[in-house]
Image (cartoon, rainbow, N blue to C red):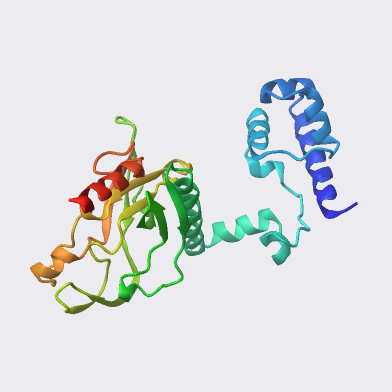
Amino acid sequence: MDSVSNIKALFGERIRELRLSKGLSQEKLGALCGLDRTYISSIERGHRNVSLENISSISEALSINISELFKGIPTNNINDILGKWKITAEELTAIVDENPSLRGFMLGYVAEHKARDFLEKLPDVSGLCKPDDHDRGGGSKNDIVAIYKEREFSFEVKSLQTNSIKYDSERGIYEGRVQVDASDRRPVTFPDGTELQTTCLLVGQFDILVLNLFQFRQEWDFAFILNSDLPRSKYHKYTSYQKDHLLATTVNVTLPIQPPYTVNPVELLDKLIETKAI
């Protein structure tokens, strides 16, 4: 048996084990998932590739987390990260959970990937890429660059600070902060040619800020805001000119999203096009 067939067989056995532990027949489990009994049967016999949507439906029907479906199932697929590192999903989860800094680091890159997936599905958006230039000093590095209506636009992706998250149960609103700055101090050049060592990002350094709100409710929600609508730095050691050209290092955001944030980046892109046409 090859590695893929072996994994499907183990997954099928795991589904059967969990189904029986819940006292469910194949027909009953199928009904709870909106799937045919024969589909459940083929899964349990290791004869079926299962879509992520159906895996989610099965986990909900069994009242367990998706990760429980894969408990104890190794991977021998050398093309995925688990296979390359020869670890299980449970081991990787434990490593990430035990190292908050690693979790935040990984979440940031996953957020960029998810944001690109979101943007590429928008009408008239194409050519999404992550630039290779990581020189923030030049102001040219952005997380995502995309073409919209034959014009190029840049996006910066930032994530919630976990320790800032609050939930107002009376209003049904999540509240949190997002750090909007560079990873370290570096020289930035202002329009008048002067330079400053700072962690702040420049006004106009990118077009749209994308806020990853996953940690509010463990869903891939995004909020979008124009660079021009972001608050400016108020640091007392900066001159008035510098404050006018530097973004604040943190911003507040809520879910549900409130202006000037929006869930629809297309309206911001259209606004940018209109502004540049004036």
User: Would you say 252 lies left or right of 44 here?
Assistant: left
Q: Residue at x 78, y 40 (%)?
A: 14
Q: Residue at x 30, y 77 (%)?
A: 186
User: Would you say 93 lies left or right of 22 here?
Assistant: left
Please tell me which residue lies in front, 162 or 85. 85
Can you say whether 209 is above or below 173 in the image? below
Please tell me which residue lies in front, 179 or 23. 179
Please tell me which residue lies in front, 156 or 257. 156
Q: Quadrant of residue 74?
A: bottom right
Please provide percent x and percent y for residue 178.
33, 54
Please provide percent x and percent y for residue 207.
30, 56
Q: Quadrant of residue 80?
A: bottom right
Would residue 25 be seen by someone viewing this image from the given angle?
no
Can you say whether 114 is above or below 134 in the image? above
Please provide percent x and percent y for residue 189.
22, 76
Q: Of all residues shown, which one is farthest toward the left?
A: 240
Q: Residue at x 22, y 62 (%)?
A: 203
Can you say whether 167 is above or below 75 in the image? above
